[in-house]
Amino acid sequence: MSSQDNMSEEHLPEAAEPHGTGLSVKDDPFADPGLPPHEPRRTDVDERAARRAERQVALLFVVSMLATVAFLVSYAVIDNSKTIYVWPFGHVLQMNFVLGLTLGVALFCIGAGAVHWARTLMSDEEHPSERHPIEADPDVRAKVLADFKQGAEESGFGRRKLIRNTMFGALGLLPLSALWLFRDLGPLPTTKLEHTAWSKGKLLVNMNTDQPLKASDIQTGSLTFAKPQGVEESDEDFQEVMAKAALMIVRIAPEDIKSRQSAEWGYEGVLAYSKICTHVGCPISLYEQQTHHVLCPCHQSTFDLSDAGKVIFGPAGHPLPQLRISVNSQGYLEALGDFTKPVGPGYWERSA
Amino acid sequence: MSTNDANAAPARPASKGEQLADWADGRLGIYTLAKSNLRKIFPDHWSFMLGEICLYSFIIIILTGVYLTLFFQPSMAEVVYHGSYAPLDGIRMSEAYKSTLDISFDVRGGLLIRQIHHWSAIVFVAAMIVHMMRVFFTGAFRKPREINWLFGFLLLFLGMFDGFMGYSLPDDLLSGTGIRFMEGAILSVPIVGSYIAMFLYGGEFPGNDIIPRFFTIHVLLIPGIMLGLLVAHLILVFYHKHTQFAGPGRSEKNVVGMPLMPVYMAKAGGFFFLVFGVISIVSAIASVNPIWMYGPYRPDQVSTDAQPDWYMGFSEGLIRIMPGWEIHMLGHTWELGVFIPLVVFGLVMMAIAVYPFIEAWITGDKREHHILDRPRNAPVRTGLGAAWAAEYLLLLVGGGNDLFATHFHLSINSITWVVRIGFFVLPVIVFMVTKRWCLGLQRRDKEKVLHGRESGVIKRLPHGEFIEVHAPLDQEDLYTLTAHDQLKPHELPPAVDENGVKRKIPASQKLRAKISRGYFGETGQIPKPTAEEHAEITSGHGHH
């Protein structure tokens, strides 16, 4: 067979090595018997099987072509916003579903055809190819090292220490200018992490209704989110402000409040805590009204709001800061100042 | 004039194709390059295609990623949405989020390309980890392939971070929470944390810079480095020639298999289309990262089940199980509850990078290795790899502790405690079990070599005893099962030298000898059957 001739060893790189090591099995029961002889496949010996395989490969390629045409047509005719129900996937965007399937089939069939072709019709005879050590032989090694020494000698690099040292100095200093250029990536931290938008007299505004909150709005067992008066969603710095100032307000029956300071910093059992987790800064949002625990959904730090925001489980390292509040003359809840401790995660400059 | 030279050309091009090839050869030297590569031999084993999945998913990521950049706006400028996804109409969001919605709902096929991009990233990192495990457990990282192992490690490391940045770009509620987590993690770094955070975010979190900066790093810097590493990785695979498993006719000095052209061109080329096809079909039927369900990022909002993509899950586990240690000293805070997991994350990754060099130091083996180990024949290495994998999987569980709690109705506190204790205990148990398992398999191999395989035929002897007839293995199996070499433990020189003076042995050498005994001593491997043992048993009478 001509295809077998083409597979003869002279067409392979370094195909000189004979099969097996030539060691006699009698000397060593575990000797290498050498490459086993090639066993022909059905398609190697039966021309009808080979032709069937050929037709199968061609069929796969034809299916791919049909799928591509289907893709092109679907792109043009399907309504982009149409949703269809497909069992068992549920409601899906028709465009995405059809384009993905047709593209997938078009690609898959090319791959399946090529692999089937390789497995059934291309020669599967295995050939050895000799390896050569990666390491150079000693002559080459000696030559290269001598070349290098000569080059180094001719440069005077080792002899002229003044040149060498100043060059190292210049090359060592230069990257500093690159480092300097990164200085304006951002401002220095200064005391930015210590302050929030809260200050004395600022009203607590309901996040959902955008109205100032009265103590009577807060029911026992409820959880309300608030922002400082004057902060609007359309503000340029809304995100930065809320990343620190977000507040959660709860009402706990005064006899259930364990920490005296917590009770004093609230108003008739209405307590305001920072919503920003002291672990890595997720907004806390899961409140258990019976136990007064809040749980951060990110890493499950759990804080006791009846006990000064103490950490009772999870990876957070310090309590949730509480905001001192009271009511003003019209009965609206107001802050008595900023948080006394920085909100959010700990950092090196944080003193407590 | 040298018309003679032209006439002296040895062969005239037979076709247009040859003519073109001659033209290219005269300028690029392609014939010399192709001489040893066109019919290059590659060995066949199913596990050798794992690396191909990495390569192909990377190519798919590049192709689909370029398409996405044509529509994506990496900007945090705020806009009010009035696009075709009605539930978010009138909502304030960044241009990044809006353009991602537009890609998903207004660009025809845009959602598909987004899904293929994301699914390929998931497959890419998974394939890299599995490919790496194949290389590890078969010892393919040994000389001369240590550098290529490092290239692969860097690809894994960069791939993970590029994935993180990629899914952060849409600026949705889930990924924004991830970016916030990153801020908290950076803040925990002693001394420089708050400075790095301010520089990275261009001021206070979230600022307006992080998405455009991530974009440049995600689409240009990291992929550029990865492309370079990938090419170097492949060049070394060609240069070293592929490893192979032991078998008849296969030795350290050859590689046995089929030629690149045509077999592997068809198989590997076809495999690219298979991988692409499967990912396309998955993208058609399974939604990944449906950002329109999460909504735009707001620092005062969060959703439950906040999970990173799977490859960041083990770092999430570390963060979740760490107790909240925090030390206040001289007006400063050591935020250890966050910083220690950050360091351990680095150590878990570095363990991968350094292992080949540690093993090379222990064995002192300077030879080239091209025949792969069966995992059972390197019990300590296999045990260590299994222990690492167990730790990794345990941390994945820790990273999803909320999901395990809600799906299996367990207490989240108990799951966290189980993972905390398991972090120290599980790797040790898995190491011991795996090592013994390997030793058991070695014993079985030895048994098979010496006594043959169980034939299933029961014979009754004249005196009434029943025995099972064992059929001797054929020569090929005998060779394959005994082809691995077994190293001897590293011996320290005698404690006193020839003059009776006490020898000074560095502590590092003592440690090396101790570990070496663990690897290759009596408890580390079962001695291979020798020719004498084989002869004794096969020549004997009445054995079974």
Image (tube, coloured by chain):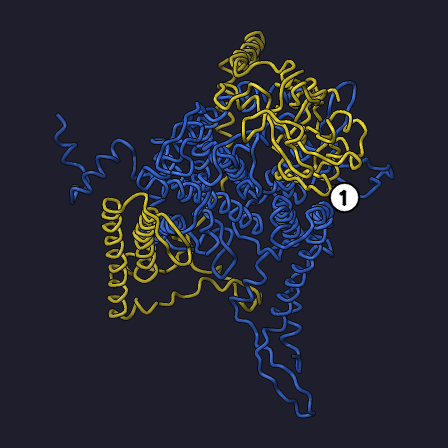
Chain colours: A yellow, B blue
| Three-letter residue code for mark 1 | Leu
Image-quadrant location for residue A30:
bottom right
- Note whether residue A249 is visible: yes
Name the element at disc 1.
loop
- Note whether residue B260 is visible: no
**Identity of the residue drawn at 62% across and 75% down:** B538
**Identity of the residue drawn at 49% across and 59% down:** A21
Question: Left or right of B400: which side holds B244?
Answer: left
* Nearer to us in this view, B532 or B391: B391
Image-quadrant location for residue B455:
bottom right
Which residue does the numbered mark 1 point to in the structure image? Answer: B492
**Residue that extends furthest to the front in the rendered view of this protein:** A330
* Nearer to us in this view, B73 or B459: B73
The N terminus of chain B - image quarter: top left
Q: Vertically, is A50 above or below A97?
A: below
The C terminus of chain B - image quarter: bottom right
* Nearer to us in this view, A128 or A323: A323
Q: Vertically, is A55 above or below B502?
A: below
Q: Vertically, is B317 above or below B95?
A: below
Question: Left or right of B85: which side holds B399?
Answer: right
Residue B505 position within the rendered picture, expressed as x and y whole percent measured from the top left: 79, 37
Q: Vertically, is B272 above or below A234?
A: below
Residue B275 position within the rendered picture, expressed as x and y whole percent measured from the top left: 39, 50
Question: Left or right of A211: which side holds A35?
Answer: left
* Nearer to us in this view, A46 or B533: A46
Residue B177 position within the rendered picture, expressed as x and y whole percent measured from the top left: 56, 33
Dot 1: few (<14), some (14–19), or many (≥20) neighbours within 10 Å?
few
Q: Chain of mark 1?
A: B
Q: What is the number of callouts on the image?
A: 1
Residue B543 position within the rendered picture, expressed as x and y whole percent measured from the top left: 66, 79
